Image (cartoon, grey):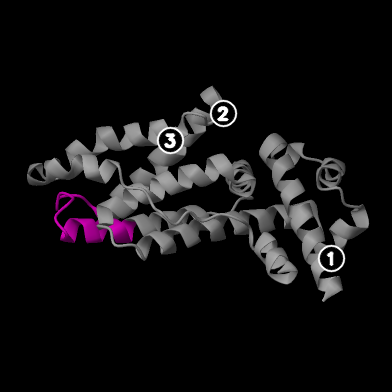
């Protein structure tokens, strides 16, 4: 058990240190020596858990994806309309990006690796699928116009969010991200909701999840072994 605890602590520290460096410098810019310095671990410890920097990057992308999908599931379990859940999802994704270095690192290296076809499309496809399902429900519930194509709208929403968070990072280091997401829905809702539902726009824009999801599985495993 003691060895398991030590291994869990070591692995979590390596992942956290790598996330910090990938978030700061990107995949190509972060060196193994910088990752080791940030994590406080030896090269031997790193290679015990991960065979290469690329495997470590893939692990962080998978963790970022797991955290995001966990948010989708947590939001789906709440008593909220489908359109409110779409808004909640965007705000929760924004919160994770601001507060969780693993989420920031996973998004950055996914985009960086995708520039030359090394990055996985899975995370974005899953976000789009989740948004498409919610869009279909929102149309059935009467909160979105029935002329909207769910797959097209889902792709647009995820693309719009990605663009907003990228510009926010460039201009303000994401300090205004929450405000920008709020503005996105302020502009979108009047054009996509039936006029008979406009009276509920303020409530929908204010929708937030009360079950924030964060933390890598490595950190959770470490905590479980420690407790």
- Which one is nearer the viewer's eye here, 116 or 20? 20
User: Does residue 85 lie above or below 225 as drawn?
Assistant: above
Instruction: Name which residue lies at 9% across and 42% down.
Output: 195
Q: Which quadrant: the C terminus?
A: bottom right
> Which stretch is magenta?
132-149
Which residue in the protein does label 3 denote? 178
Marks 2 and 1, the one that precedes in the sequence: 1
Q: Residues within 10 Å of mark 1 (few under 14, many from 20)?
A: some
Q: Label 2 to label 3, Cα distance in Å?
A: 12 Å
Image coordinates for residue 152, horizontal then vertical, percent: 30, 49
Which residue in the protein does label 2 denote? 173
User: Could one spot residue 50 in this view of the protein?
Assistant: no
**Residue pushed farthest bottom?**
1
Which residue in the protein does label 1 denote? 6
Secondary structure of residue under mark 3: helix
User: Does residue 31 lie above or below 66 as drawn?
Assistant: above
Image coordinates for residue 46, horizontal then vertical, percent: 85, 57
């Amino acid at each position: 058990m003691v060895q398991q605890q030590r291994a869990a602590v070591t692995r979590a520290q390596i992942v956290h240190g790598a996330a910090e460096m990938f978030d700061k410098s990107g995949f190509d810019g972060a060196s193994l020596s910088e990752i080791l310095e940030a994590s406080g671990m030896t090269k031997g410890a790193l290679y015990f858990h991960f065979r290469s920097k690329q495997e470590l990057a893939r692990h962080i992308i998978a963790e970022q994806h797991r955290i995001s999908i966990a948010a989708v599931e947590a939001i789906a379990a709440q008593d909220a309309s489908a359109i409110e859940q779409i808004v909640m999802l965007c705000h929760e994704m924004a919160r994770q990006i601001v507060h969780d270095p693993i989420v920031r690192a996973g998004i950055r290296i996914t985009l960086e690796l995708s520039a030359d076809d090394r990055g996985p499309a899975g995370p974005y496809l899953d976000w789009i699928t989740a948004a498409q399902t919610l869009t279909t429900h929102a149309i059935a519930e009467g909160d979105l116009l029935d002329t909207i194509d769910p797959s097209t709208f889902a792709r647009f929403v995820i693309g719009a969010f990605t663009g907003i968070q990228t510009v926010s990072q460039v201009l303000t280091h994401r300090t205004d991200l929450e405000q920008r997401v709020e503005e996105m829905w302020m502009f979108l809702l009047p054009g996509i909701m039936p006029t008979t539902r406009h009276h509920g726009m303020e409530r929908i824009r204010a929708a937030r999840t009360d079950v924030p999801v964060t933390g890598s599985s490595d950190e959770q495993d470490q905590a479980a072994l420690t407790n």
